[in-house]
Amino acid sequence: MTQEISLYTPLTGYPELEAKIAYGLAKVGVESAEVESITIEPLGGCYKITINGTKDKLESAFNTIMHRLFSSKFIPLNTPGVTSRTALTLTTQKNEKFELDDYFRLPAINFKNQTNEPVCRHGKNTVSAVIGLTASTSYHHERDYINVDNKKENGEIHKTHRPTNPKEICKTCALLALLGTWSTTFIFNIKDQEVVITPILKQKLGGAQLIKLFSIQHQLRNIKMTADIPSTLIPILVLSKIPSNLEVLKDFDLHIAVLTRPQGYHVDSLYIGATGKYIEYLNNNSYNIAAIDNMFENNAIEALSVLNNLLITRRKDMLLKFARVYVSQTSSDNWINLMYYQTAKYLSEEVCMINKEIINNKAISSLAQTLRYFVKERKYHYADDLRNSRKDSKDFEETIVKMLREARLRKEQDDKIHLPNDEEIKEIFNLAQDNFDDVKTSIVLLALAG
Ligand SMILES: [Zn+2]
């Protein structure tokens, strides 16, 4: 008789380790029961996995998978953060049997912090909780003096630096975490760094969504990035590579560990970020994704950083800074690359909440057209002066007057240049009295987009 079985992860306190164990258990579920019946639910620190099946079937599937995947050290050895010495401890012996009893009860909270206790509090057969299982255990910096041991030898105190201080974890949890790693995490290289991204779910997930989650990592195995990319930019870059699967990752955090191996493994940086704001941006229109590709191909790291900042902070001044840096970093010597109009619209209306009546105002787009003429000529100073102008100064009006004077002079030689009429200019100055920031932002933004 099948019944609903609930399994619980051990509450290790390491977010990505906990999630990997949960994915490992769900993967075992997929091999032994109907996919539709499987759910994972975050319980604040640990996860509950429900499966419609029997304990015997689940345990037998678990043992089969463990022996199939871990009888050789191939998988552990190819996991970033696992050295060849530890890989050997993460293989199964011929008659080794694994039980799931420990996962059938909600983990007890034990406030006593016992030094030699394994992180999962399952006794028995333990292995090292190395970086490959959880990078969080190993993020120790010398400057914090966390990784310094004081040892007394012959009456003298020696300080020894430990690059890592892995605790112990039971072997069953370790293998489940590896199974979870190879089912869900995104692993790729940025120059000589190995990046491991663990999606951490914040809402209950089940059935088809779970299968989708298991399939995403295959699409990301071959990403190659050769530029220096700060870890804060990894979420938006990675998400832009999987546009058709973004919905699944909507309620996730991405846990990013960047590893290097000068001697042994070292955690270079750890970063956790929510996916929501990036997914909103990427899902809105395909130009938004094209803009990311464009910046990535042109190595426009500063532009990407400003966009990242803009999406998170939603600050209006970041919008114009982004537009300006985007144009200069993606343009070549003989071609000015303007921002996509659809991206400019999205960022101004949905991210910075600029008054739609202002950004769609005819007079404003007329003046923006004149300003764009100068941008295309690489004469950025009018755009920059407007961008930097303040409400109570005369800079805004003076820059416009100066620009219109030059435009009128040029009109005699170049018929293509567009000139706004006097009514439009009057309307803009009137609008600017009450909505200075929105008017200024709209004019410059539209000039830099096309
Ligand atoms: Zn354990």
Image (cartoon, rainbow, N blue to C red):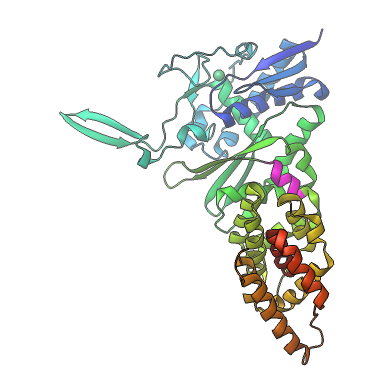
- Residue 217 in sight from this viewpoint: yes
Q: Position of residue 112 (x, y in %)?
A: 44, 14
| Picture quadrant of residue 162 | top left
Q: Is residue 411 positioned above or below 112 on the image?
A: below
Q: Position of residue 143 (x, y in %)?
A: 36, 42
Q: 179 or 425: nearer the eye?
A: 425
Q: Position of residue 93 (x, y in %)?
A: 56, 21
Image point (62%, 71%), residue name: 394
Of all residues, the one furthest to the bottom in this rendering is 413
State whether the magenta stretch is mostly helix, strand or loop.
helix
| Picture quadrant of residue 397 | bottom right
Image point (62%, 20%), residue name: 9
Q: Which residues are magenta?
A: 275-282
Image point (57%, 52%), residue name: 190
Q: 433 or 334: nearer the eye?
A: 433
Q: Position of residue 245 (x, y in %)?
A: 78, 42
Compared across the picture, whether 31 is left or right of 232 comes to right
Compared across the picture, whether 290 is left or right of 185 comes to right
Q: Is residue 324 positioned above or below 345 on the image?
A: below
- Residue 92 in sight from this viewpoint: no
Compared across the picture, whether 161 is left or right of 425 comes to left
**Quarter of the picture for ligand 1?**
top right
In the rendered image, residue 190 lying in the magenta stretch gets the answer no
| Picture quadrant of residue 75 | top right
In the rendered image, residue 277 lying in the magenta stretch gets the answer yes
Q: Quadrant of the C terminus?
A: bottom right
Q: Quadrant of the N terminus?
A: top right
Q: Is residue 370 positioned above or below 22 on the image?
A: below
Image point (70%, 67%), residue name: 444
Compared across the picture, whether 427 is left or right of 106 comes to right
